[in-house]
Image (cartoon, rainbow, N blue to C red):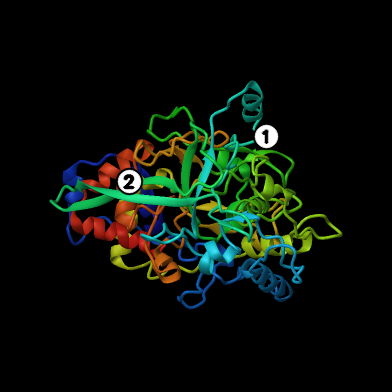
């Protein structure tokens, strides 16, 4: 006689059988107070594996080091935190260790956008944007432009005057490039049980342009600063484990066609798989750090040695201004300082989950799989060992992402390609820590531009490859949606 499956395997088998199906309303409506329950798998309550932080839940819960780094390296983490918080000043300055800001910039420190290492937000009415900015680019205009894009040596072609990012601040004596403007219109989405949710559709513009008109074909893409936790663990997932999940032609017919972005990595000095940024435009944490130093703060690094930041040749005064170059290295962020920020960023720990064994959360876990959400928000990975820092190697982690690009539909499209990502594609955002957004950042704004004001709104914006999952959520009962959201909030 066959032996029954252990409870943990029965739960996992149920999830695998349900995942990705468009369930009939009768199935999703079954069991208003009970319903199917998943199981808590071994180690699932520690999303960062042994590196998970067990510190108290408060505004600083995203700012603790990986539990696996030794005492000596904790000092490097704290010093890196200091550089992350450092307010940079314009040149020339008596504070030579902190000068070189701009000349055009979006923030004076990393912390300004990633406050408490958390998520940014769109500006309120009448407020200057601080943790949100506009990416800029234009379609290729020449065969040389096309060759650069095809070779992946550049991800985009910049606006000829304003570059790749709108800078809304400047040093004394220069004009900022302009100010981001955002407005919203609302429209209803009806759920199956009679509830109506109002979604807000953003419209973006730029006020007070100071350097002439934008290119007539300019493409704008708004971005809020993402949360910072677990980046080193994502970097440590073997590339092959990501690529094996890719299915760009949807050969298996499940409606999900994830593909990797491929980008030039200044850090690796080769084309590599993108992992970081809203469109997976950076291959390594070092690349992402360098791009942020230069694009957001206007500081040069050994990987991005432009000491005038994103200033274009058309911005003459900007290019002629003084720099804060270190006399020995010829860049504004010396290598030792840069490496400390990378170490800090790599080791920001993922917090332990809250109440992962409650009945509502376990019912929500089953619904998450049944709705098809796990098709892109892949729950479990294991970090590699080769070339991975010892403190992050060989760990089972639960980030809920595949780090691949997916078509998210016309509603979320920015129509701005970036390397291999087209204008409708976005990288699957990791879900770990998402339930602590309000605790850390003081708001619940989600998605790449913060248009969603809560988790349900974020889900209802999903379309394209995620359309089936969205329809499944729409047809759930109120109690089932409550359980689904309870599960996601527990991550």
| Horizontal side of residue 458 vs 401, given as left or right | left
- Spot the residue most to the right: 328
Q: Is residue 78 above or below residue 187?
A: below
Contact, CB < 8 Å: mark 1 with mark 2? no
Of the two numbered discs 1 and 2 in the rendering, the one whose residue sits closer to the viewer: 1
Q: Is residue 200 above or below residue 150?
A: below
Q: Residue at x 40, y 58 (%)?
A: 8
Disc number placed over residue 202 in the picture, else none: none
- Number of numbered labels in the structure image: 2
Q: Residues within 10 Å of mark 1 (few under 14, many from 20)?
A: some
Using the image as rendered, state which of residue 246 and residue 328 is in the foreground: 328
Disc number placed over residue 461 in the picture, else none: 2
Q: Residue at x 37, y 47 (%)?
A: 373
SS class of the residue under badge 1? Answer: loop
Query: If the image is split into quadrants, where does the C terminus sit?
Result: bottom left
Counting from the top left corner in percent of width and height, residue 94 is at: 76, 71
Residue 4 appears in the picture as rendered: no
Counting from the top left corner in percent of width and height, residue 178 is at: 50, 50
SS class of the residue under badge 2? Answer: loop
Q: Residues within 10 Å of mark 2 (few under 14, many from 20)?
A: many
- Spot the residue most to the bottom: 56
Q: Name the residue tied to disc 1.
A: 153
Mark 1–mark 2 Cα distance, whole angstroms, equals: 33 Å
Counting from the top left corner in percent of width and height, residue 151 is at: 66, 29
- Spot the residue most to the front: 173
Which numbered disc, 1 or 2, marks the residue that appears first in the sequence? 1
Residue 141 appears in the picture as rendered: yes
- Spot the residue most to the left: 194
Q: Residue at x 25, y 60 (%)?
A: 482
Q: Residue at x 39, y 64 (%)?
A: 435
Using the image as rendered, state which of residue 249 and residue 265 is in the foreground: 265
Counting from the top left corner in percent of width and height, residue 40 is at: 40, 62
């Amino acid at each position: 006689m066959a032996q029954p499956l252990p409870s943990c395997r029965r739960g996992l088998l149920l999830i695998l059988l349900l995942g990705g199906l468009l369930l009939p309303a009768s199935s999703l409506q079954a069991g208003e107070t009970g319903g199917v329950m998943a199981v808590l798998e071994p180690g699932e309550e520690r999303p960062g594996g042994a590196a998970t932080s067990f510190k108290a839940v408060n505004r600083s819960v995203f700012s603790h080091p990986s539990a696996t780094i030794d005492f000596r390296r904790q000092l490097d983490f704290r010093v890196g935190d200091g550089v992350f918080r450092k307010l940079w000043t314009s040149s020339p300055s008596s504070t030579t260790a902190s000068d070189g800001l701009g000349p055009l910039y979006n923030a004076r420190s990393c912390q300004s956008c990633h406050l408490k290492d958390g998520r940014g937000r769109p500006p309120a009415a009448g407020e200057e944007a601080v943790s949100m900015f506009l990416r800029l680019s234009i379609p290729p205009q020449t065969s040389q432009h096309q060759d650069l894009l095809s070779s992946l040596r550049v991800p985009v072609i910049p606006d000829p005057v304003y570059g790749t990012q709108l800078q809304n601040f400047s040093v004394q004596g220069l004009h900022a490039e302009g100010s981001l403007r955002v407005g919203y219109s609302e429209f209803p989405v009806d759920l199956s049980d009679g509830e109506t949710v109002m979604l807000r559709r953003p419209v973006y513009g730029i006020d007070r342009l100071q350097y002439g008109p934008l290119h007539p074909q300019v493409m704008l893409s708004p971005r809020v600063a993402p949360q910072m936790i677990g980046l080193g663990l994502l970097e440590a997932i073997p590339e092959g484990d990501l690529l094996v999940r890719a299915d760009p032609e949807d050969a298996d017919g499940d409606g999900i066609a994830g593909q990797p972005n491929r980008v030039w990595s200044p850090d690796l000095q080769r084309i590599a798989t993108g992992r970081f940024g809203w469109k997976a435009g950076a291959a390594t944490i070092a690349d992402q750090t360098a791009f942020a130093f230069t694009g957001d703060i206007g500081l040069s690094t050994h990987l991005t040695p432009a000491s005038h930041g994103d200033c274009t040749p058309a911005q003459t005064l900007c290019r002629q201004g003084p720099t804060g170059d270190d006399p020995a290295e010829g860049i504004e962020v010396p290598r030792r300082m840069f490496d400390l920020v990378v170490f800090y960023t790599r080791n920001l720990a993922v917090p332990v989950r809250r109440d992962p064994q409650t009945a509502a959360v376990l019912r929500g876990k089953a619904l998450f799989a049944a709705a098809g959400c796990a098709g892109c928000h892949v729950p479990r990975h294991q970090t590699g060992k080769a070339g991975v820092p010892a403190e992050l190697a060989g760990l089972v982690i639960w980030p809920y992402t595949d780090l691949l690009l997916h078509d998210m539909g016309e509603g979320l499209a920015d129509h701005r390609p970036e390397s291999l990502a087209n204008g409708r594609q976005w990288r699957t955002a990791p879900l770990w820590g998402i339930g602590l957004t309000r605790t850390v950042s003081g708001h619940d704004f989600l998605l790449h531009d913060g248009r969603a004001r809560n988790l349900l709104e974020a889900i209802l914006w999903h379309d394209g490859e995620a359309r089936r999952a969205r329809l499944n959520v729409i047809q759930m009962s109120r109690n089932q949606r409550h359980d689904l959201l309870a599960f996601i909030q527990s991550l």
